[in-house]
Image: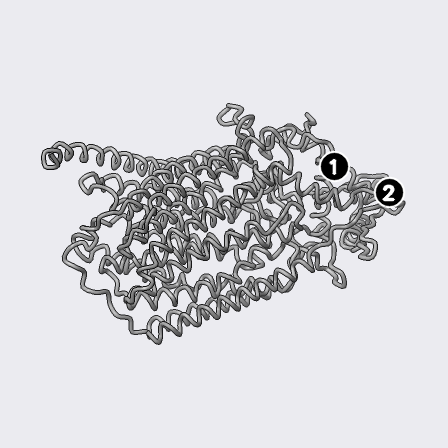
Amino acid sequence: MHASRKLWTWLALICALSFAVLGWVGTEIYVAAPPIPNKVVDIRGDTLFTAAQVQRGQQAWLAAGGQQLGSVWGHGSYVAPDWSADWLHREALALRELWAQKGYGLAFERLGAGAQADLSARLQAEMRQNTYDPQSGTITLSNERAQAVEAVAAHYAGLFGDEQQLDKLREQYAMNSGSLPDPADRQALTAFFFWAAWSAATDRPGETGLSYTSNWPHDELVGNTPTAGAGIWSIASVILMIAAIAAMIFFHAASKEAGDPVPPQADPLFDLKPTPSMRATKKYFYVVIGLILAQIGMGVITAHYAVEGSSFFGLPLAQILPFSVSRTIHTQFAVLWIATAWLATGLYIAPAISGYEPRLQKLGVDVLFYALLFIVVGSTAFGWLGTLQHEGSAFSFWIGNQGLEFTSMGRVWQILLFVGLLFWVTLLGRALMPALKRPSESRGLIAMVFLSALCIGGFYASSLAWGQHTHYSMIEYWRWWLVHLWVEGFFEVFATAVIALLFTRLGLLRASTANSAIVMETIVFLFGGILGTLHHLYFTGTPTFVIAIGAMFSALEVVPLAMIGVEAYHNYRRSKAAPWVQTYKWAIMCFIAVGFWNVVGAGLLGFSINTPIALYYMQGLNMTAAHGHAALFGVYGMLGIGLMLFCLRGLSERAAWADNLLRPMFWCLNIGLAMMVFMSLVPSGIYQAWASVSKGMWFARSPEVIHSQFIETLVWMRVPGDLVFALGALLLALFALRLWAGGRRLRAQAAPDALPAEA
């Protein structure tokens, strides 16, 4: 008990210090973020853009699809360009060509090597010079550069408008014509894109060769190459990771862990009678399966748009379901169904653990279900309609699609979801309270479940931290609080504690061992995970020390994965511990799959892009998508399915259970995911990385690469994996349908026998 208390003290201390540092970093980002100028003028004093236009342009881009339609500073989708990289390169080419025509009367490509070298050096000096005056808040451009900016602005205004000569380019970008019908929005959009590109190439005050985005994106035309810090901290992070893994293995080998207990002769949960509130969670899991099927369907459509742009096998589907909408639903539903599975698991296990059904608990579970259903349907419908009808930035921000990846629902829906999560914590807490008050060996585990649930409810408040006019650097800072800390952090702690609690209830794990192990695991995970959030923010207009902190602590996130194989092996042994454990075989197999994908998806693929030097070249490319698919579904998705199967086992008639469907379901999902990742996403990501290293980010995201024969072939190579994966999801749906129908049939057969007895 004393050792356990010391671990809890260390956990509290690490969390407090880590969040203090993360909060301090936020204040520094706010101070050091690229300045939004009051106006951008040429030497004559003519105004090109104003601060109001830059801010309106940010809102207009987010309303048009935002991070679901290309990206800025590397965060977003992958078919359309990174607009900051694309603008930067186009502006540099336009300015160089203007100088060549004006000075030599020839196109740049026709000049001699000496003249080309002179103009290239002049271009770098011009693009990197910081002419921002903090006193007046003005950026001053040369007349020639102002001309180049106006030419690029005209291109983007036409692209987001309806100029017919750009139809082919829009098709390649998976954009619809007239994405921004309002000319004032299009003009403002160009102001935002100019500012994002200006921040990416302009030297910070007092620095030489160091832009506000630490020289991201790679483009040697404007002198954007990796900083020394990116290389040094990448090397240091790898060394730290190796040393920490060695220490973890040594600690594990030196520790004398008690073996698993002798399993009970019979299933301890066999006689568990679900309470009314426990039975009420069953509908949550059927909605989870429906969301999985919808997410997969949207994923198929979204992937196909990478080939046809605005059609689906010749059908003009983008007219009613644009790429930005299909990708929004695909990414948002992934988070929602996983979260719903975990929330329902919490509501199911709380009364089972405590043996207490609070008054009106079932009513609360039902109210929460319909509230969550209302939020899912409402946010999806309003986001979809808002995009189709071009309702504008205010509509998009408040009740439509905010245009931010993984957190796209409008503010009203976010507030409602926050209230719903707090209500969920209340329901969970009132059911767990007797178990928390009652001394027992597993009280530490129960406390961890409840504390992580509190964090899940509380930390969703980070989604309310930004507003319509918030600086883009700060939006990214708070967005990653939500995506990294909420989804990847506290939900994982919650799920891990729940799994340990389930194994102790089954008599397959000693409660005393699990208590210390879960706190220790949480310490190791959050020690790297909290400040590891910063690896998402290397190049989003943040101070350079963010690279150092993010690199070192994100390397520590990999350390716990070193022992995942051992944990997976223990889980496999537990699945064979006694004949009755086969009842839970496929739930446990899902937990074993989590271990595999934790190593492969989160570990190998994650760390392959996490170091600053790797992410410098690969941010916003398909290696990110490979990591995202393998980690999000492989780890969190399989975890959600495993928990769902465990709960459905206790909620369903045992005679209706069909393992013959779960076996192919399990293997189809995992094999299909592996095929999708390693036959398509990883090869295309490596090819894009080569393009980024050799020529620049603008090239890696250009139609020349994205729609090359090689990349489009790799897109088609997704089809076999997608089909196998979809088959697995359909088998899961068929299993659930048969479980429901079989349960109804068994209850109907039992009813006639019960009637005489009742009479």
Residue 440 in which image quadrant: bottom left
Residue displayed at 51% across by 65% down: 238
Residue 77 visible in the snapshot:
no
Q: CA distance from mark 1 to mark 2?
A: 16 Å
> Is 688 drawn above or below residue 541 in the view shown?
above
Residue displayed at 44% across by 57% down: 454
What residue type is disc 1 on? Gln
> Is 549 drawn above or below residue 222 in the view shown?
below
Horizontal and vertical percent position of residue 520: 39, 68
Horizontal and vertical percent position of residue 427: 38, 51
Give the residue number, with chain letter if any, for mark 1.
187
Give the residue number, with chain letter if any, for mark 2.
46
Horizontal and vertical percent position of residue 616: 60, 55
Disc 2 residue crowd, few under 14, some 14–19, many 20+, Cα 10 Å? few
Horizontal and vertical percent position of residue 444: 34, 65
Residue displayed at 55% across by 62% down: 551
Residue displayed at 34% across by 47% down: 361
Q: Is residue 499 left or right of residue 375?
A: left
